Image (spheres, rainbow, N blue to C red):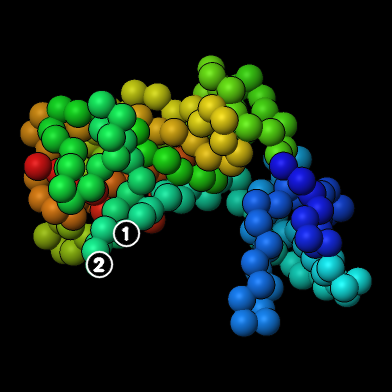
């Protein structure tokens, strides 16, 4: 991936960040980047250099992990980007089923082994280093109940940059419903917890 796009570049503590895209909407410019693997957790200096020569520097906090699930929208319902065993995507009209192995696509899981380089796409066999725990919840309210799920695999998605594929076996007794919640937790070496914001998945 390029570190300069449409004349724009971004660095984290002086390390160039690969750029996914630069968007100019109604006079406001947005740039989306991959935080370099070389950047250590903590407060970092982020320098943004514009196409016209202007620049600004801001401080940002980088965490060891920041799990986030990719989502898409069906009608008015936001659903996790996830695939059923036949390769089709989970949707309200094509829900997951108890006992299925479902692959979720997420970001923010850190380095993998064998290690990858900043800006490079994943290749088969690169697995996530961080310990993970996954579950399915029936709701997020006081009456929520959770079913622990089995983590089958967590890998750097082949052919993609900054994207991880997490495969989960839904228990046979998983509660069904149009908007069950997939949750995931990553742990660092000190035992600190980094939670994925819950995302919905239809299960039938």
183 left or right of 63 in image: left
The reply to whether the C-beta atoms of the residues labelled 1 and 2 are less than 8 Å apart is: yes
Q: Judge whether 19 appears above or below 203 on screen.
A: below
Q: Residue at x 25, y 67 (%)?
A: 76
Which is more toward the observer, 137 or 89?
89
Residue extending farthest bottom: 26
Q: Is residue 128 left or right of residue 19?
A: left
User: Is residue 202 toward the left or the right of residue 106 in the image?
Assistant: left
Q: Is residue 44 above or below residue 40?
A: below
49 sits left or right of 151 in the view: right
Q: Where is mark 2, residue-wise?
A: 76
In percent of the image, x 59 and y 41: which residue is there? 162
Q: Position of residue 186 (x, y in %)?
A: 46, 40
Q: Vertically, is 94 above or below 73?
A: above
State the residue at coordinates (61%, 39%).
161
C-alpha distance separating marks 1 and 2: 7 Å
Crowd around label 1: few <14 · some 14–19 · many ≥20 (10 Å): few
x%, y% of residue 12? 78, 54
Q: Quadrant of residue 151?
A: top left
SS at circle 1:
strand
Q: Tell me where residue 120 appears, x and y as whole percent.
A: 69, 33
Residue 73 badge: 1
Instruction: Determine the image quadrant of residue 121.
Output: top right
**Residue 51 x/y as whole percent:** 84, 68
Secondary structure beneath disc 2? Answer: loop
Q: Is residue 102 visible?
A: no
């Amino acid at each position: 991936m390029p570190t300069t796009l449409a004349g724009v570049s971004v660095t984290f503590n002086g390390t160039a960040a690969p750029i996914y895209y630069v968007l100019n909407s109604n006079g406001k410019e947005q740039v989306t980047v991959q935080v370099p693997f070389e950047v250590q957790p903590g407060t970092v200096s982020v320098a943004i250099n514009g196409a016209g020569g202007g620049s600004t520097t801001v401080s940002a906090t980088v965490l060891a992990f920041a799990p986030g699930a990719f989502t898409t929208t069906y009608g008015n319902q936001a659903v996790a980007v996830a695939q059923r065993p036949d390769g089709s995507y989970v949707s309200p009209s094509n829900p997951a089923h108890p006992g299925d192995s479902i692959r979720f696509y997420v970001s923010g899981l850190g380095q993998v082994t064998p290690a990858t380089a900043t800006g490079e796409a994943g290749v088969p066999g690169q697995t996530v280093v961080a310990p993970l725990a996954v579950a399915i919840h029936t709701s997020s309210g006081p009456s929520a109940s959770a079913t622990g799920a089995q983590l089958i695999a967590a890998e750097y998605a082949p052919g993609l940059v900054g994207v991880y594929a997490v495969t989960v076996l839904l228990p046979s007794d998983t509660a069904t419903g149009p908007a069950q919640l997939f949750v995931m937790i990553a742990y660092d070496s000190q035992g600190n917890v980094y939670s994925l914001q819950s995302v919905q998945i239809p299960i039938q």
